[in-house]
Image (cartoon, coloured by chain):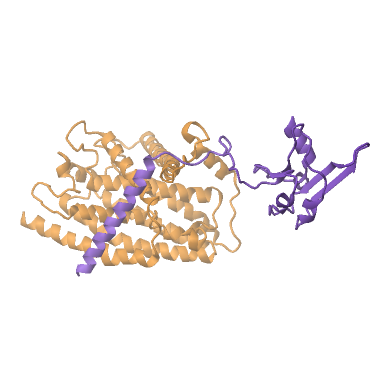
Amino acid sequence: MVTYFSEIFSGLWSLIIGLSITFREFFSPTVTVHYPYEQVVMPERFRGHIQLKGDEEGNPKCVVCMMCQRACPSGCITVAGKKKEGEKKKTLSKYTLDFTKCSLCGSCVESCNFDALEFSKEYKLASTRKEDFIMDLMQRLEEQNK
Amino acid sequence: MELTFFNVAVAVTIAIGFAAINAAYLVWAERRGAGRIQRRPGPNINGPLGLLQPPLDGIKLMAKQLIIPGGADKALFIAAPVLAMAPAIVSFVTLPFSDTIVAHNLNVGVLAIFAFASLGGISLLFAGWSSRNKYAVMSSVRAVSQAIAYEIPMLVTVITVVMIAGTMNLTDIVAAQKGGIWNWNIFPFKAGLFNPLMTMSFLIFFICALAETNRAPFDLGEAESELVAGFHTEYGSMGFGLFFMGEYANIVVGACLTTLLFLGGWSCPFGLFPGVWWFLLKIYVIIATIIWIRWTFPRTTIYGLLNLSWKILIPFSLFNLLLTAGLLKVF
């Protein structure tokens, strides 16, 4: 009999505690980001798709060593380079990322010895077409340089 | 007042309008309230403060196709959502808002409203049974057992109030609570009747009202984690819309009844400016509490629900009925 009543009272009390918590939350400020109108800045270590880094003049730092292409477990990177006339080293002519296969493992960035690759902060990548995910990173770098 | 066609038409329009506008805008209030409790703003895009959200939702629902599943019992399937909405609107016939604002002052107003309210359970049974869907059937079985379990303590509590007032006329029940907050049925300082358990009766009535309207934490009929969507699994379009509106219209009826029976109706707590505004203030405070409760407590289990009714609410309400009867006899 005593437990019956004490259970009722402790139950009621717990309900009141619960109500007081939500009452406090009701008057506290909202914490959500109102997405299309407000957008979060991605943190420093956010891993988006990769992008090329440029030097001071805006040319890609890439020396076409092909390490990233070899490091990629899914084979989504295609690098091509050619020698310009009168130059010894190759320069980058094509850098395509097939983002449909990329798993964002970062092996390419890790394998790069010339600090030529980095993660972008891009996260609004939704699209209805597959072609949108085959990215030309050279073009992207050019657009960033503008 | 004379009963002319014009009067009747105006009264019906006002009743349906009041129920429908309340139902629509309580959805908005609910979503805004839920948002605030969960530290987000809720719908705020359509119109100022999101106030255009309910009509837009309505347009969207009406634009959809009403699909009747194959093998369903068509007549019952179509009748169920109408039955869910109708009793709530019919109840406004006899619910008084003040001394003068009442469509028809029935002498058995309390009885009439509870008779209409019991139709709500039947609409859930119809909906679940006619859908030809196992989840819907299970949900309707739950809804019926819940309706039976919670109508008993609710009616016993109402009998207590009716005994104190000596009438089933809602206007007279309010008149018996006039003259300040200590005369309300919720508080034990009623002249000539010192019953300290009336506050408990109020709580029992409030809990039963929550359960009768199938509101969280007692919304086992539509427990989406177990039963898809319960009795309205197969309903789309305005069929679902009517169930939804019916739920909110029932909340308004429940809040009105709680106010009339326990909180002194349109009488002011300290005897100033009696009028319909006190009534509206009280029902909206109660509705806000109902919304607040929904977003605070998780859903109970079916066992917890039935245990609460049969082991706690029914014994307590019966005890208070006996105590009140004794007190009325002695004093």
Q: Which chain is orange?
A: B
Q: Residue furthest bottom?
A: A1
Left or right of A125 on screen, residue B152 = left
- In this view, the residue in front, B115 or A85, is A85
- Res. B164 in view: yes
- In this view, the residue in front, B301 or B6, is B301
The residue lying at 66 percent from left, 46 percent from top is A48
Percent position of residue B72, x then y: 56, 62
Q: Quadrant of the N terminus of chain B?
A: top left
Q: Residue furthest left?
A: B330
Q: Residue furthest top?
A: A146
Above or below B212: residue A1: below
Percent position of residue B321, x then y: 18, 59
- In this view, the residue in front, A24 or A68, is A68
Q: Quadrant of the C terminus of chain B?
A: bottom left
- Res. B129 in view: no
Chain A appears what colour? purple
Left or right of A42 on screen, residue A84 = right
The residue lying at 19 percent from left, 68 percent from top is A2
Query: Where, by quadrant of the figure, is residue B267 drawn?
Result: top left
Query: Where, by quadrant of the figure, is residue B12 drawn?
Result: top left
Q: Residue furthest front?
A: A88
- All told, the count of numbered labels is 0
Above or below A31: residue B213: below
Above or below B288: residue B207: below
Percent position of residue A124, x then y: 65, 42
Percent position of residue B105, x then y: 27, 43
